[in-house]
Structures are given as C-alpha cells and as structure tokens.
Amino acid sequence: MCVDELVAQGMRLADLAPATRASMQRWAPPEASLRNPIDLTPQASLDDYRLALEGVLADEGVDAVVAIYVPPVRPDELEVARAVWQTAKGHRKPVVCNFLGRAEDSPGFVELVGHGVPSYLFPESAARSLAAMYRYAQYRQREEGEARIFRVDRSAAEKILSRARADDRAQIRGDDANALLELYGIRAAKTRFVPRIEGLAKAAASIGYPVVLKATGPEIVHKSDLGAVLVGVRDEKELVDGATQISHRLRDNKIALDGFLVQEFVEGGKEVVVGMTRDKVYGPLIAFGLGGIYVEYLKDVALGVPPLTDRDAMRMIESIRTFPILQGVRGEGPRDLEALQDAILRVAQLVSDFPSIEGLDLNPVFALPRGRGYRAVDARILLARDA
C-alpha cells in the first residue's frame, strides 16, 4: 500500500547498494526480504530494526525512509519507537513512520511524535507526507525569477470599469473588454460590435476579410453549442447571410440577441485559456491551460497566486499535461511561450490592480508560432456586485 502510494505520488524506490544488502544479510532473519521495500518479518529483533534503519540511512542512494512497524508479540512497540527516533536523529535524511494498527495515543506513536518523527495511522498517509516534503523542497530550491511591473494607463482602465458599474453591468464584453485588455498590453483580436445586421459590412471592411462573426447576448456563452459563430467569413454576402441565419436560429430558440461581434480571423494558433477566479481566502487565482471548447472536459489547468514572477508564469505553462502540444508535436513548430508568459503576467497585474474584477476568462487565446505572439479572441470580465 505504501509503495503504491509513493509511486502514485511520483516518488521512486531507491536501489539499495550491494554493500548495504550484503551487510544486512549477515544479521537479518533468513526469511527477510532485503530488496526495497525491506521486509524483516515478525522474527526480527529490536537490534534488527535498528541495524536495518541505520543501514538504509547510510546508503548514499537513499534520500528518505518510511519505517512501517506491524506490532507482533515482541519486540515491544515502545522499544522499537525509541530505536527509530534514536537512529533517525543521527542522520539528516527524513524518516516518517507508520505503526500499523495502533492509535494516536499508543505508546509507540506518542514516543515517535514526541521526538520529532512524523508518524501516521496508515501507510498511505506516511507516503503522501514524504511526497509533500519532496515537493516543498523542490519549491524552496526553485529559481524565484523576476517580478515584472508593466507601465499601463490605470486611469483609463478605471473609466471603463466605472462606466460598467454605472450601467449596473455584471460583466464586460466586446469592445469595452478588448479596450481594457489593450490598456494592459494584452493582445486581443481586432473586434467591432455591431447592434444591427446593416452595420456588419462596414465593420468587416475596417478589419479586413476573412473575419469571424459571433452573436452576443446575455444567454449566449458557449457560442459553438448554439450555432452562434461563423469562422472564416470571406465576403459581404456570406457575412450578411450568416448573420441572418444565426438571428433566426436564436429567435426560434427564444434566445435574446444583443448584436454581433465582427472579429479578425486568426489562423495557425493553438487554443489556450488564461483566466482568473477570485478566491475568498487566496484572492485572485490565475489560471492557464489548454483552451477552446474542451477546457471544461480536459480540466488541464495550472493555477498561480499573484504577485507572479516570470518563472512562476513559465512554470504554469510547463506544468500542464498538454504542454508538449505547445512545444510542437508531429512536425508542428513550438508556440510563442514567452508571449504566453507575458500574457499571464499582465492578466495578473490587471486583476491585482482592480479588486472589483471578480473573474476574467480569455478563452480561447490563440497561441501562435514562436515569434508571432498570441491573440485573445473571446474575453469575459465579471464584476463584483458590491464593488
């Protein structure tokens, strides 16, 4: 059970040195198994436990030890506990212990805890504790990186947020969302909001074909599911016809339509998500993961708590399971990881500057090939009601 949990936690069993095993063979019970994990069997004496722990702690290939004791008739558990802590204190390597079948108030358990040896009721708990120690040690040793503070126009950003609050809006989307992002240097796809079909052609001409057409409205969140988005629209007729079909479809389904977004068509990108949720305890939690329509199903998201350094942001990118896709697979080139790093840091600064932003969702963000940056093609910014 302990070994299974250690492996599940990403730990690796040490290969004991031949000299360590040879030394143990001179005194261990004949029935003992001296390969990791070591099993001394119920025939082991108190000295056997002490020598085994001393031997593995002295092995240069061993970084830490989980000592599990299943109390037989002898030796006494208190004596074993005393032998464990007395041996462990002579080494700098972590030792955690499990006295199987004993309660927290048992003599052996109390003895170990009283002398600074972390002890647990179950082997799996001891394994998870050791894995947590390792992860914390990695965290302490990692490169801190550099905190970046970007020069932005906070007063202009405040005006956008104040206007939304004055209008009693719970969220900011469309032109205002893109304007807010651009004030913080977050690259959004060129977008125009058009309330009526008659204005679509002018908006598309100002951006340049091909374009993307999206319907907007309070109930229109997952546009693809509602058939409320057209990609790669190449001329005015296709644009107007598509908008007419979308409006009829939404009307038939009794879904309110506020208007349309006409947006530049971004090609060659991998879809990622950059977002924020404000936690009552931790404050803003910055999220990064593979995006698009599968984000809720993949659940492959890394979190970070501002203030973030450049290394924190890059670690978030590198830690998702699907990171190899961003590095390039099956002949594809890598995405612009430094640009994504920059986006995460700018989002972190934006939401830290304005606590009234309750949530932020940039999904999808198209991560373009190296050197070409990224484009956020859909933005949703939620405002706190009591802000």
Image: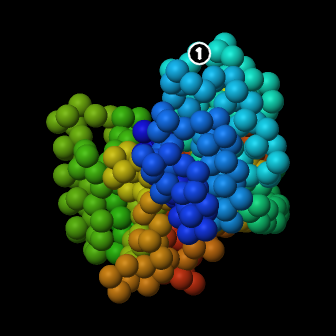
Q: Please give left or right for residue 99 compared with residue 313 in the image.
A: left
Residue at (81, 30) in percent of width and height: 115
Counting other residues with Cα less than 10 Å from the Cα at mark 1, is it few (<14), some (14-19), or many (20 or more)? Answer: few
Judging depth in this view, the residue of 108 and 322 nearest the camera is 108
From what the image shows, is residue 267 above or below residue 343?
A: below
Residue at (79, 24) in percent of width and height: 114
Colour scheme in the image?
A: rainbow
Amino acid type of the residue tagged 1 in the rendering? Ala
Q: Please give left or right for residue 253 compared with residue 139 in the image.
A: left
- Judged from the image, the secondary structure of the residue bearing numbered disc 1 is loop
Q: Residue furthest top?
A: 105
Q: Please give left or right for residue 33 compared with residue 46 in the image.
A: left
From what the image shows, is residue 243 above or below residue 340?
A: above
From what the image shows, is residue 98 above or below residue 23?
A: above
Q: Where does the N terminus fall, quadrant-wise?
A: top left
Find residue 167 and report its horizontal and vertical position in percent: 61, 31
Find residue 317 and report its horizontal and vertical position in percent: 56, 63
Residue at (63, 24) in percent of width and height: 77
Labels in figure, total: 1
Using the rendered view, name the quadrant where residue 373 is placed. bottom right
Residue at (67, 30) in percent of width and height: 80
Determine which residue is flagged by label 1. 103
Whether residue 22 is visible:
yes
Judging depth in this view, the residue of 115 and 221 nearest the camera is 115
Judging depth in this view, the residue of 381 and 98 nearest the camera is 98
Find residue 358 and report its horizontal and vertical position in percent: 63, 35
Find residue 30 and report its horizontal and vertical position in percent: 45, 49
